[in-house]
Image (cartoon, rainbow, N blue to C red):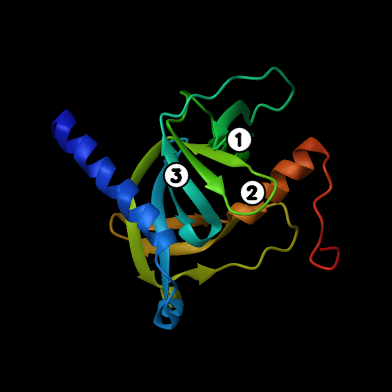
């Protein structure tokens, strides 16, 4: 695949992703889940588009010193300085190289997660996602989804946000406190 082919594919993926936020939701969409197939730390995962507010490739991340290995640094998004955490590190994987992709998690405060490879955008029947109940609140994986090439764990971005808050000692308001 040539560099132009890759660039064209990435432009198309970005346009599809951006368009998914601009289109009004439809009731029949409840039967489907929009996912990003990604790799973090050399392992395949899936992310729910409904839990993301943006996707960026190659955005500069300014490193910050500190004790949190998962904190890559900060990046600018629309005039805001946003902390960037490495999904591979949060999942306990070795991080041999710097991730190229950033996904902005939906919600506040702004927070971005980095991963190494974007495999594509997929739409699956919601019933195909096997949900797993988390008992300890520490796991950022929320289930499994069968995709072409094999079954992938699903990363729950709100749970990843909560994991970051636990790492940094920040209190995250519960549903009752909001």
Q: Is residue 148 above or below residue 160?
A: below
User: Residue 96: percent from the left, percent from the top?
Assistant: 48, 23
Left/right of residue 164 with respect to residue 34 in the rendered view:
right
User: Where, by quadrant of the figure, is residue 66 drawn?
Assistant: top right
Secondary structure found at label 3: strand
Residue for badge 2: 160
Q: Is the C-beta separation of discs 1 and 3 under 8 Å?
A: no
Looking at the image, tell me whether mark 2 or mark 3 is earlier in sequence order: 3
Q: Residue at x 52, y 53 (%)?
A: 52
Q: CA distance from mark 1 to mark 3?
A: 14 Å
Q: Residue at x 43, y 71 (%)?
A: 24
Q: Is residue 59 above or below residue 124?
A: above
Q: Quadrant of the N terminus?
A: top left
Q: Is the C-beta separation of discs 1 and 2 under 8 Å?
A: yes
Left/right of residue 92 with respect to residue 21 in the rendered view:
right
Residue for badge 3: 55
Looking at the image, tell me whether mark 1 or mark 3 is earlier in sequence order: 3
Q: CA distance from mark 1 to mark 2?
A: 9 Å
Q: Is residue 142 above or below residue 82?
A: below
Secondary structure found at label 2: helix
Of all residues, the one furthest to the front in this rendering is: 79
User: Residue 105: percent from the left, percent from the top?
Assistant: 58, 49
Residue for badge 1: 85
How many residues crowd around disc 2 within 10 Å: few (fewer than 14), some, or many (20 or more)? many
How many residues crowd around disc 3 within 10 Å: few (fewer than 14), some, or many (20 or more)? many
Q: Residue at x 72, y 52 (%)?
A: 138
Secondary structure found at label 1: strand
How many residues crowd around disc 1 within 10 Å: few (fewer than 14), some, or many (20 or more)? many
The foreground one among 80 and 174 is 80
């Amino acid at each position: 695949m040539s560099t132009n082919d890759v660039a064209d594919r990435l432009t198309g993926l970005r346009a599809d992703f951006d368009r998914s936020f601009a289109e009004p939701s439809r009731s029949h969409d409840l039967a489907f889940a929009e996912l990003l197939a990604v790799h973090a730390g050399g392992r395949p995962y899936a992310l729910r588009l409904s839990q993301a507010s943006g996707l960026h490739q190659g955005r500069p991340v300014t490193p910050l010193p500190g004790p949190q290995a998962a904190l890559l640094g900060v990046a600018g998004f629309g005039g805001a300085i946003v902390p960037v955490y490495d999904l591979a590190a949060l999942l306990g994987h070795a991080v041999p190289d710097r991730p190229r992709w950033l996904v902005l998690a939906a919600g506040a405060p702004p927070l971005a997660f980095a991963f190494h490879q974007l495999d594509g955008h997929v739409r699956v029947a919601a019933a195909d996602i096997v949900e797993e109940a988390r008992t300890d609140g520490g796991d950022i994986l929320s289930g499994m989804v069968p995709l072409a090439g094999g079954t992938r764990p699903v990363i729950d971005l709100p749970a990843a946000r909560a994991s970051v808050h636990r790492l940094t000692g920040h209190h995250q308001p519960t549903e009752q406190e909001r």
